[in-house]
Image (spheres, rainbow, N blue to C red):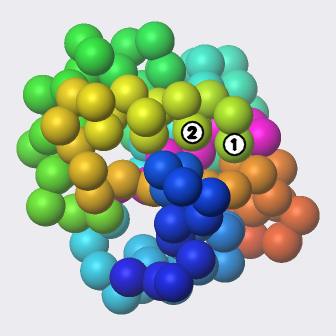
Amino acid sequence: IFPNILSGGSRKTITSKNSVLAMNREPSFLIDVRGKQEFDLGHLQNAVNIKLEDIPDKLNIIKKHSKKLIIVYCQKGIRSEQAVNSLIKLGVDNVVSIEGGINAWIKEQLPIANK
């Protein structure tokens, strides 16, 4: 989609600004892999909260959206990169992580939703 989605070998990351462009151009499924308390403090609009460790158990939910671009994020981008790697191993390949997580999103002054 975007030339910089793939950066540094197998890492599949996307900047927060490019994730907005991607969401506006194609159907997307947003996954917040942080804990519920972090999610409740603020999250991206329409994001589904699936903790990193729960991804294998929630794979059936994620695979229902496999035709969409799956965008994963966390606080800083570390857990979401782990989630992307897990999802790829589980057979989901249309998946990217937001570089820098929600911190980068907020730094770009993009909107967040609160519970």
Q: Is residue 21 left or right of residue 66?
A: right
In the displayed structure, 13 sits above or below 25; it is above
Q: How crowded is mark 2: few (under 14 residues within 10 Å), some or many (20 or more)?
A: many
**What residue is disc 1 on?**
77
Q: Is residue 109 left or right of residue 67?
A: right
Q: Mark 1 and mark 2: span between their CA atoms?
A: 6 Å
Q: Which residue is painted at 64% across and 38% down in the image? A: 74
Q: Residue at x 58, y 45 (%)?
A: 73
Image coordinates for residue 67, horizontal then vertical, percent? 13, 61
Would you say residue 98 is visible in this rendering?
yes
Element assignment for label 2: helix
In this rendered view, identify the residue nearer to me: 5 or 67.
5
Indicate the amino acid at tag 2.
Glu
The N terminus lies in quadrant: bottom left
Residue type beneath disc 1? Gly
Q: Quadrant of residue 16?
A: bottom right
Q: Which disc number belongs to residue 42? A: none
Residue 40 appears in the figure: no
Q: Position of residue 93 (x, y in %)?
A: 26, 50
The percent position of residue 40, horizontal first and vertical second, equals: 65, 30
Q: In this view, does 52 lie above or below 17?
A: above
Element type at marker 1?
Answer: loop
The location of residue 70, given as percent across then percent down, is 34, 54
- Specify whether residue 64 is painted magenta: no
Pointer 1: residues within 10 angstroms few (<14), some, or many (20+)?
many
Q: In this view, does 8 lie above or below 10?
A: below
State the residue at coordinates (46%, 12%): 53
| Span highlighted in magenta in the image | 70-76
Residue at the extreme right of the image, as rendered: 107
Q: Is residue 57 left or right of residue 33?
A: left
Q: Name the residue under label 2.
A: 81
Residues at marks 1 and 2 touching, judged by CB atoms closer than 8 Å: yes
